[in-house]
Amino acid sequence: MRPMGDPMALLGMARRAGALAYGTGSTRRAVKEGRARLILFATDASETQREKVMKLLRHRETPRATLGTREALGSAVGSAPVSAVAVTNNEFAKELAARLNVTPGYQLKSGRGGRPSGCGL
């Protein structure tokens, strides 16, 4: 069981609350529909999958970060490995962003445990 301060544990709660879109296709759909409040990418997501989502984010100020591997993200949301996850609920997005030290207009790269490890996407 993950500690409650772990961003991955919060992702699991968000999934159970129906506050996530996971997988590249669902994440893109959430961005297009304006439902995405925070985007999380796996550290090992392919450039192709990452770019599919990033193209839609070019003119949006949706905060984004990297968190864990595809396997870890998939496990946290109860699915197969995923490259991207969109948090669609404001409260979950705010809490995750706070735990990952992400603010709009600034992207923070985070390690597997949710601890910041450097800037940029």
Image (cartoon, helix red, strand yellow):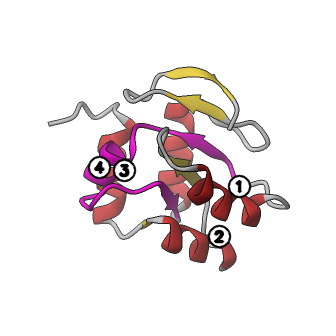
Secondary structure of residue under mark 1: loop
Q: For marks 3 and 4, give the one nearer the viewer.
A: 4
Q: Is residue 121 left or right of residue 78?
A: right
Instruction: Compare marks 1 and 3 and give the one earlier in the sequence.
Output: 3
Secondary structure of residue under mark 2: helix
| Quarter of the image where one finds residue 22 | bottom left
Q: In this view, does 12 lie to the left or right of 60?
A: left
Discs 2, 1 touching: Cβ within 8 Å: yes
Can you give x and y, in whole percent of width and height, for residue 91 in the image? Answer: 51, 54
Say which residue label 4 marks.
76
Is the residue 46 above or below the residue 2 in the image? Answer: below
Label placed on residue 11? 3
Can you give x and y, in whole percent of width and height, for residue 42 in the image? Answer: 47, 44
**Circle 3 residues within 10 Å: few <14, some 14–19, many ≥20:** many
Give 84 or 96, whichever is nearer the viewer. 84
Say which residue label 2 marks.
31
Instruction: Compare marks 2 and 1 and give the one earlier in the sequence.
Output: 2
